[in-house]
Image (cartoon, rainbow, N blue to C red):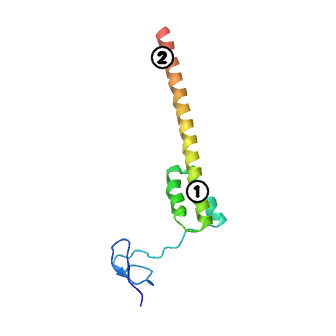
């Protein structure tokens, strides 16, 4: 006889063959994220252009047991970090340029 398993959300006993918790509706056997080439491209683009969300997407893949999913997760996290670093460098450079221009304009007004 199968031993009951606890739902991770509401901790109600559920049967091992159940796909959903009868009490709260939690999916007990979620489908793993796809590692198809098309999905990988989407994940990588999201990691580059939506940097904070790339971390969450990457960790979703890193929690899987197969090597390919872990590789996709690592790539997504690395791309997200690189994108954040590049955005930070560009923002700091822009702020420095604006600050320099404002100071130059103020100096010109003082000398006028």
Decide which of 27, 8 is in the foreground and name it: 8
- Residue at image x 51%, y 62%? 60
Q: Quadrant of residue 86?
A: top right
The crowd level at tag 2 (other Cα within 10 Å; few <14, some 14-19, many 20+) is: few
Image x and y of residue 80, in percent: 56, 50
Image x and y of residue 40, in percent: 62, 61
Query: Is 13 situated above or below 112?
Result: below
Specify whether residue 112 is in view: no
Decide which of 69, 101 is in the foreground and name it: 69
- Residue at image x 33%, y 78%? 12
Q: Looking at the rendering, in which quadrant would you find the N terminus?
A: bottom left
Q: How many marks?
A: 2
Image x and y of residue 19, in percent: 45, 80
Decide which of 106, 94 is in the foreground and name it: 94
Query: Is 96 situated above or below 19?
Result: above
Q: Is the Cβ of the residue at disc 2 closer than 8 Å to that at disc 1? A: no
Closer to the eye: label 2 or 1: 1
The crowd level at tag 1 (other Cα within 10 Å; few <14, some 14-19, many 20+) is: some
Q: Taking 12 as reference, is 42 left or right?
A: right
Element type where label 1 sits in the image: helix
- Residue at image x 54%, y 71%? 32
Q: Residue furthest right?
A: 37
Query: Is 14 situated above or below 73?
Result: below
- Residue at image x 61%, y 60%? 71
Q: Which mark is residue 74?
A: 1
Decide which of 97, 72 is in the foreground and name it: 72
Image x and y of residue 50, in percent: 53, 51
The residue that label 2 is drawn on is 106
How much space separates mark 2 and mark 1, taking CA atoms?
48 Å
Q: Taking 71 as reference, is 102 left or right?
A: left
Element type where label 2 sits in the image: helix
């Amino acid at each position: 006889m199968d031993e009951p398993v606890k739902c991770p959300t509401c901790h109600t006993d559920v049967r091992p063959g159940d796909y959903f918790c009868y009490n709260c509706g939690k999916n007990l056997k979620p489908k793993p994220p796809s590692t198809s080439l098309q999905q990988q491209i989407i994940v990588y683009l999201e990691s580059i252009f939506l940097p904070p969300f790339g971390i969450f997407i990457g960790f979703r893949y890193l929690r899987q047991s197969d090597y390919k999913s872990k590789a996709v997760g690592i790539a997504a996290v690395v791309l997200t970090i690189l994108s954040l670093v590049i955005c930070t460098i560009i923002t700091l450079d822009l702020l420095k340029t604006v600050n320099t221009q404002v100071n130059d304009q103020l100096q010109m007004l003082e000398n006028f």
